[in-house]
């Protein structure tokens, strides 16, 4: 039996459905509005939007669901905000950030979860380690 984590490593980002264009525009507007608010935290946030492969993990950092694409925004060395069009219910997430300078996959602890607008969900997470 193949574990979900083994499947994730062999699947490319392109094989997953791209987030809808209206969601991308919504997130771009969201970060544009948030950029007007002063930066908090010790690491600078990057107000860009990236597609990120995301896998829900349990408390033991084992996969508990299938991989999916999210939109990562406000990425810093400490964490990121992830937006998806379906609720994300997990304590931890494996987030692939190959597109940004981190160039790796991170394990992130979910700090805050909220519904934004009627159709989108945002998860703020803190990076706790690099994924093995």
Image (cartoon, grey):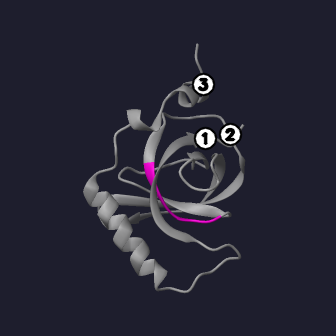
Q: Which mark is residue 6?
A: 3
Quadrant of residue 125 within the rendered picture: bottom right
The residue lying at 58 percent from left, 71 percent from top is 45
Would residue 6 appear left or right of 120 to someone viewing this image? right
Most foreground residue, 38 or 50: 50
Secondary element under disc 3, as helix, strand or loop, is helix
Residue 132 picture quarter: top right
Residue density around tag 1, few if under 14, some if 14–19, many if 20 or more, within 10 Å:
many
Task: Check disc 3: other Cα within 10 Å, few if <14, some if 14-19, many if 20+.
Answer: few
Which residue, as the protein is rendered here, is positioned at the far top? 1
The dominant secondary structure in magenta is strand
Task: Return the x and y of residue 20 as percentages of the image width and height.
Answer: 28, 51
Q: Is residue 124 visible?
A: no
Q: Residue at x 63, y 41 (%)?
A: 58
In depth, the one of 92 and 46 nearer the eye is 46
**Magenta span:** 70-76
Residue with the mark numbered 2: 61
> Gap in Å between the C-alphas at discs 2 and 3?
14 Å
Q: Nearer the viewer, residue 86 or 8?
A: 8
> What residue would you read off at disc 1?
57
Against 50, is 45 above or below? below
Tag 2–tag 1 contact (CB < 8 Å): yes
User: How far apart, in angstroms, are the residues tagged by discs 3 and 1?
Assistant: 13 Å
* Closer-to-camera residue (108/76): 76
Comparing labels 2 and 3, the label whose residue is closer to the camera: 3
Distance between the Cα atoms at labels 2 and 1?
A: 5 Å
The x, y position of residue 107, in whole percent, is 66, 48
Residue 13: image location, x then y, percent: 45, 38
Q: Quadrant of the N terminus?
A: top right
Which sits earlier in the primary sequence, circle 3 or circle 1? Answer: 3
44 w.r.t. 100: above or below: below
Under circle 1, the secondary element is strand
């Amino acid at each position: 039996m193949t574990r979900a984590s083994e499947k994730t490593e062999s699947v490319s980002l392109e094989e997953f459905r791209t987030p809808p264009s209206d969601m991308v525009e919504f997130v771009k507007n969201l970060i544009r509005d948030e950029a007007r608010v002063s930066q908090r935290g010790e690491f600078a946030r990057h107000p860009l939007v990236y597609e990120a492969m995301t896998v829900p993990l349990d408390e033991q950092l084992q996969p508990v669901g299938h991989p999916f694409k999210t939109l990562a925004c406000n990425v810093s060395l400490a964490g990121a905000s992830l937006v998806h069009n379906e609720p994300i219910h997990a304590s931890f997430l494996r987030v692939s950030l190959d597109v940004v300078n981190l160039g790796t996959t991170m394990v992130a602890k979910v700090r805050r979860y909220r519904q934004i607008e009627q159709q989108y969900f945002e998860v703020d997470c803190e990076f706790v380690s690099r994924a093995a």
